[in-house]
Amino acid sequence: MSKIRGYFKLVLLLVYTLTTFGIYWVGLLIPKLLSRPYEPWRNLFMQTWAEGVAFIFNMEVEVEGRPPEAPFFLVSNHLSYLDIVPLYLSLKCTFVAKKAVRSWPLIGYMVYAVGVIFVDRKRKTDVKRVNELLSTSMNEYQGLIFFPEATSSGGEGILPFHASLLQFPADKELPVHTASISYATAEGDEPARDSVCFFGARHGFLEHLMKSSQTHKIYCKIKFGERTEQSSDRKELAAKLKENIEEYFEPTS
């Protein structure tokens, strides 16, 4: 029965994503032709898409704290590809993602089309290019979200923060916001660490997506920090941000 439920959700997810993205892509022509900002249209699409995904996966999102208003720079812990759902539901934003995502069939193009910024973390010279791009991407229509752990985890704690992409807010001495995400599943489901968190090399993406889709219900709590952190030294900033999130972080059950 769980597999049938899983396949049904995945088919519904595919149809819903392709349909809404098709509408977004056609509607995108209007601001492009009129030389108007496309971010408001993108924000509407991403929030609508996130609402649909939350419905399909029976995901209940609880928000604590006050989400920042654009423009902002925000860092969060990273547990799963599903993290973007509570973030898009709460914020007008775009993400900094690893370059490998751009090469994924279909998904890579769709992610590129909604304005995600890609970085090659293996090339130190790419950081300068990305930091220059970040300076032009943070505007009144969108904030920037960065996962400084540089990988996802099982949610037991916060992994060490990588400071390289914090050079931009350090140079500008920008106040950096924080958020923490945690998950739980319904009684009878696999624990969220195994069915929602996507980390390590235990499962391929499609295999794990199937596991997530077989859950009865996913509970997500996203907390926004009460204060910001800033420093002109990126390593000091990374340490401050990690300590900030650890103050209110809840492990994934």
Image: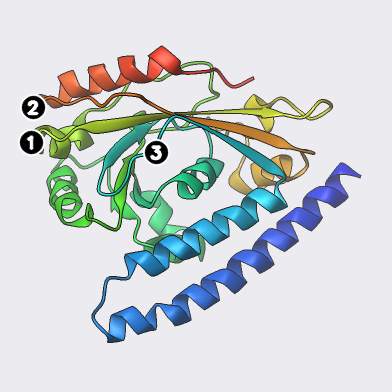
Kindly identify the residue that appears in the image at 42 percent across and 60 percent down: 43
> Which dot, 1 or 3, sits closer to the camera?
3
Residue 68 percent coordinates (x, y): 34, 40
Q: Circle 1 sits on which residue?
A: 171
Q: Amino acid at mark 2?
A: Ser
Q: What count of labels does the image hold? A: 3
Q: Circle 3 sits on which residue?
A: 67
Q: Amino acid at mark 1?
A: Asp
| Left or right relative to 72: residue 221 | right
Closer to us: 64 or 47: 64
Q: Residue furthest front?
A: 66
Kindly identify the residue that appears in the image at 53 percent across and 16 percent down: 156
Kindly identify the residue that appears in the image at 53 percent across and 37 percent down: 80
Closer to us: 80 or 218: 218
Mark toward the start of the polypeptide (1 vs 2): 1
Looking at the image, can residue 113 be seen?
Answer: no
Q: Circle 2 sits on which residue?
A: 232
Residue 245 percent coordinates (x, y): 38, 20
Q: Secondary structure at mark 3?
A: loop
Q: Are marks 2 and 3 in contact (CB under 8 Å)?
A: no
Residue 232 percent coordinates (x, y): 8, 27
Marks 1/2: CA distance?
6 Å
Marks 1/3: CA distance?
24 Å
Q: Are marks 1 and 2 in contact (CB under 8 Å)?
A: yes
Q: Residue furthest bottom?
A: 33
Mark toward the start of the polypeptide (1 vs 3): 3
| Left or right relative to 8: residue 33 | left
> Which dot, 2 or 3, sits closer to the camera?
3
Q: Secondary structure at mark 2?
A: loop
Kindly identify the residue that appears in the image at 10 percent across and 33 percent down: 173
